[in-house]
Image: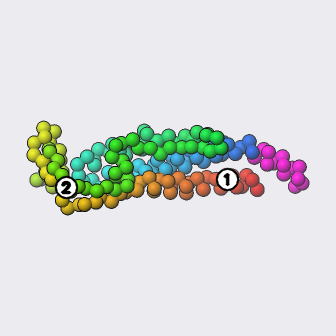
Amino acid sequence: MNLEERIRQLRQAKTQIPGILARAGMNAALRAVEKAVEETPPTVNSLRGTNTRTGEMKQHWVTDSRPRPVRQGDSYVSELNNDKQYASFVNDGHRMDRHFVPGLVINPGSGLLEFNPDGTGGIVVGTRTAYVPGLFMVDKAVEEYRRVLREELKGLEELME
């Protein structure tokens, strides 16, 4: 292959690069959303406590994220979002200060926390657990994004050879 043929080959490859990058970014972002959903409670072994069984936070990864890459200057941008107010506390961990929660009771039959909508009863929480560790769903999702993106962009290497 002479120099002119190589230049022609690289020019042709240049037209394919934006599509390859967008497709790779989309696939990686979708897999990152899947990973965040997978790591978010409730999981198979974490069905306990009040407000953990609804799966509302898990569902919000899909509805709030924007996996389709948008070109901004020289970059392609995708977003991994969860707009639930408490998502950052579950992700990063949080302190548990001792405080009274009206309407929160321990169900004698199941031993689980339940909420009485009429507000009767209540318990003091934060007595046994001073700190709730985070689950780091976002870190795991970003790691998955990077892994998939590297795998997807191997085809770009081959195109440039």
Residue 110 visible, this angle: no
Q: Is residue 3 magenta?
A: yes
Position in image of residue 31 (x %, y %): 50, 49
Helix, strand or loop at mark 1 = helix
Helix, strand or loop at mark 2 = loop
| Residue with the mark numbered 2 | 98
Secondary structure predominantly adopted by residues drawn in magenta:
helix
Position in image of residue 16 (x %, y %): 71, 43
Residue at image position (60%, 56%) is 150
Q: Is residue 3 left or right of residue 94?
A: right
Q: CA distance from mark 2 to mark 1?
A: 55 Å
In this view, the mark in front (2 or 1): 2
Q: Is residue 25 magenta?
A: no
Residue at image position (87%, 55%) is 1
Callout 2 environment at 10 Å: few (<14), some (14 to 19), or many (20+)? few
| Residue with the mark numbered 1 | 155
Residue 33 visible, this angle: yes
Position in image of residue 66 (x %, y %): 50, 40
Please state the extent of the stretch shown in magenta in the rendering: 1-13
